[in-house]
């Protein structure tokens, strides 16, 4: 029981790891002893975050745009060249788009759905061999998809492709989990509520106002997000298969 949340010796990859929720998760993994690779589209930001987090533990920057299948395969190849296996994959990279129904563009649909729902599938597919090398019945590999409470309940904003992509990812997590379990790879998900990030500027810039709408009276902290991810990534979460953990301070209960 003392080692239930230990990640010593584990190799993890966090997409969108240069900021926000991805950075929170990467830091949490490092504190628990994992070696962490982070990737992001902007190389300078990715490198800077890796340098900052290296004060906690080994954190390596692999900047690449994973919004295309080609990018996902390039990232998988880089991991394969550097590591003999991959124990943990966090599919966190995401995008959002808000625009009124009458003018909502195809570009705002394709960009968001491709990155939020298609990329987790094809990146996991590309890293399947590396994950299988790490996986055993006694110690499965892990894949964690970062969804959103907007895929569970409806928010007031016209973010059509975002809501659809996150709802789709929650169901995709169930379907993929069923297949990956055959290879001792456990897939699960997290649906964050209000956490301060570039994706959630309301929580970032108006945290006190947002907190008044959260039953527990505050927005999420880095420890809240790291704790949920560590639970799922560690031995503690081995029997959680295909489910998406809601981490929102009760926000969905009030919608």
Image (cartoon, rainbow, N blue to C red):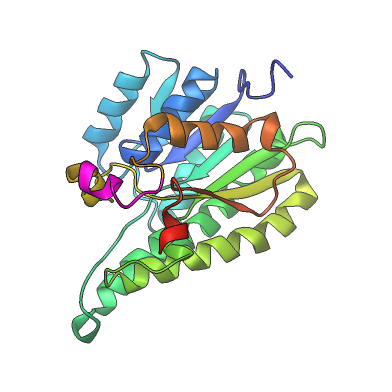
Residue 62 in view of the camera: no
Image point (61%, 38%), residue name:
232
Residue at image point 61% right, 25% down: 10
- The reply to whether the magenta stretch includes residue 212 is yes
Residue 150 lies, with reference to residue 17, above or below; the image says: below
Closer to the camera in the image, 173 or 193: 193
The residue closer to the viewer here, 86 or 195, is 195
Q: Nearer the viewer, residue 181 or 78?
A: 181
Q: Can residue 84 be seen in this view?
A: yes
Of the 4 image quadrants, the one containing the C terminus is bottom left
Q: Residue furthest right?
A: 137
Specify the quadrant of the image occupied by residue 15.
Answer: top left
Looking at the rendering, the stretch of residues picked out in magenta corresponds to 208-215
> Residue 125: x percent and y percent?
59, 54
Residue 141 magenta = no
Q: Is residue 98 above or below residue 219?
A: below
Indicate left or right for 67 with 98 as reference: right
Residue lying furthest bottom in this view? 102
Direction from residue 39 to residue 102 in the image, left or right: left
Residue ranking furthest to the top:
55
- Name the spot of residue 228 as percent of width and height, x first: 53, 37
In-front residue for pair 232/61: 232
The residue under the point 35% across, 44% down is: 64
What residue do we see at 48% from left, 18% from top? 31
On the picture, is 75 further left or further right than 188? left
User: How many marks are shown on the rendered structure?
Assistant: 0
Spot occupied by residue 189 in the image (x, y as percentages of width and height): 56, 50
Quarter of the image containing the N terminus? top right
Residue 121 picture location, percent across and down? 54, 58
The answer to which image quadrant residue 195 occupies is top left
Query: Image check: 169 left or right of 197?
Result: right
């Amino acid at each position: 029981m003392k080692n239930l949340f230990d990640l010593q010796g584990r190799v993890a990859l966090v997409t969108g790891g240069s900021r926000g929720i991805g950075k929170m998760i990467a830091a949490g993994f490092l504190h628990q002893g994992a070696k962490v690779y982070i990737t992001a589209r902007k190389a300078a930001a990715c490198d800077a975050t890796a340098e900052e987090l290296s004060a906690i533990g080994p954190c390596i920057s692999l900047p690449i745009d994973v919004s295309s299948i080609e990018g996902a395969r390039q990232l998988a190849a880089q991991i394969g060249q550097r590591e003999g296996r991959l124990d943990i994959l966090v599919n966190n990279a995401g995008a959002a788009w808000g625009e009124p129904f009458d003018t909502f563009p195809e570009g705002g649909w394709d960009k968001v759905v491709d990155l939020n729902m298609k990329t987790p599938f094809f990146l996991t597919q590309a890293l399947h061999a590396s994950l299988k090398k790490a996986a055993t019945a006694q110690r499965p590999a892990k894949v964690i998809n970062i969804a959103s409470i907007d895929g569970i309940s409806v928010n007031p904003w016209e973010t059509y492709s975002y809501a659809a992509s996150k709802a789709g990812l929650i169901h995709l997590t169930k379907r993929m989990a069923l297949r990956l379990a055959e290879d001792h790879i456990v897939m699960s998900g997290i649906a964050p509520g209000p956490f301060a990030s570039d994706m959630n500027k309301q929580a970032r810039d108006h945290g006190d106002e947002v907190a008044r709408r959260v039953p527990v009276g505050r927005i999420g902290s880095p420890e809240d997000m790291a704790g949920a991810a560590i639970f799922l990534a560690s031995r503690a979460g081995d029997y959680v298969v295909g489910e998406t953990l809601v981490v929102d301070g009760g926000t969905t209960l009030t919608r």
